[in-house]
Each structure stands twice: as C-alpha cells, then as structure tokens.
Image: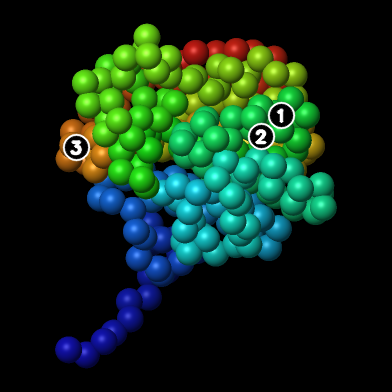
Amino acid sequence: MAEFEVNISPENRVYAKPRLITDNTMHYCPGCSHGVIHKLVAEVIDEMGLEHDAIGISPVGCSVLAYNYIDIDWIEAAHGRAAAVATAAKRLNPSKLVFTYQGDGDLAAIGTGETIHACNRGDRITIIYVNNAIYGMTGGQMAPTSLPNQVTQTTPYGRDVNVAGYPVRVCEMLSTLDGVALAQRVTVDCVKNVNIAKKAIKKAFQNQIEGKGFSIVEVVSTCPTNWGLSPIEALQWLRDNMLPYYPLGVYKDSVKGARLHEHE
C-alpha cells in the first residue's frame, strides 16, 4: 500500500499528540492514568516554552521510565529521594524548572521525610504526585494511601486500620507547612477534571518560575491491573471510593490565602 501524508492546516487541526511526547510505546497498563498525566505535563512545558529549561526527576515506581516518554532532561533518583535530588538540581540551576514525578509508594512511604523537609524549607520545586492507593510496579501491595478495608496482595482481607494505620492524606498534611505555596488535589477521570488538572500543573510550574515556594499537585489515579478491574470499572471505583476519602480541591494557595475543599 502506498504511503501518503495528510497535511492539516493549523486552523483545522482539532487535536495533535503533544510535541514533547516521544514516539516510544508506553509500558503502562491499559487504563492507567499515567499516560494522561504525562500528556498534561508535556503540554504545559511546551506551552510555557520551557522545553530547554525543564529538568524532571524520575522516581522508583511505575513511572521510573518517564524519561522515555517526555523529551526533556531527566535525572533518575533512588527510591523516595526525588525531592532531595530536585532540591539539589534547583539550587545548582536556579533558573531551571525542576519537578519530580512520583507515585504514592515513592513519596508517601520511603520518601516521606525528604518530601516534608523540602516543603518545610520552601524549596522552589514542583511535585507531581500520582496517588493510586497501591504499589503498582511491585505487584499490588498495600501502600500508605490504600483505603480502609481495601484488598491488596499484602492485605488479602482488607486493610485493617487497627494494624496498618490510616491512609495518608498528603495534601492535607503538607498544607500546614509554611514553605508550601500550593497544595492541590485533582484527578483525570473525565474531560472536565483533566482540564482542571492541567491548570493546576501550569499554576504549580508558574509558582516556581515566580519564586513563590514549593508546589505539589496530587493526582488521584487508577490502577486497573492491581485493583483487578477493567479500565471503566476502575474509573467508577475511583469515584465511589477514592474521591470521598481524598476530596478534590485546593488545600493551600499562598496567593489567594484560602483553603478550599471543592474545585471552583
């Protein structure tokens, strides 16, 4: 079959793959939220003209290969140490946009100490925090964010809060620290929420450029494979179970001086 190109004029183009997303096939499972979040990060960096000034910090976890998918400079961090690596990168390169891309197993477990102290110092970095309530890469073990009674590989009868404690609400916790400029929780389960998430990521990056301190955007996400659900079922499970425990909204905005619980 002969190959041919279709030239679409800019005014007629409805959608195009983000310019900074590579042609590499993503390794994420069907229905995983990482692909959508990668797309938003790539779009925002491109739209802000920061392609050559962005430094991403990859964690240990499902997004360990993020550097294969977003065409910017990346540094690979040891498990849980992304915030510490980002602090060093930013202090050595203060004019650069430095951000981490971390899951809940990385940030809210082994990386809790690094994260809290980076926030408390007001380090001018940004964290994109993906919360899917489970350890995804290692096979579906209980994470610090797993819900009460949630069945995982290490809690086959459900998470018992009397034994394992309660899920960690990261945005609520970090919003109490003076060094935090923005703490916002979003999700990407529908078009409306995808647009809200993109605006939050852009605001977090803009805060850093303007030297306003530490910003974190938490994205409540799905993990269909380890939840044992189809992609569609996983989205509904997120709405029915995760969002009541992890309410969406702005938990701290140092510019507005407000703490909100719902999206505006």
Q: Which residue is mark 1?
A: 117
Real-space Cα separation, disc 1 to disc 2, in angstroms? 5 Å
Query: Going 76% across and 48% down the picture, which residue do you hit?
Result: 88
- Farthest front residue in view: 163
Task: Name the residue nearer the viewer: 69 or 143.
Answer: 143
Residue 239, position in %: x, y? 29, 24
Q: Are marks 1 and 3 in contact (CB under 8 Å)?
A: no
Residue 189, position in %: x, y? 33, 34
Residue 151, position in %: x, y? 24, 26
Residue 63 shown left or right of residue 189 in the figure: right
Q: Are marks 1 and 2 in contact (CB under 8 Å)?
A: yes
Q: Is residue 241 visible?
A: no
User: How many marks overall?
Assistant: 3
The three-letter amino acid code for the residue at tag 3 is Gly
Q: Which residue is mark 3?
A: 228
**Foreground: disc 2 or disc 3:** 2
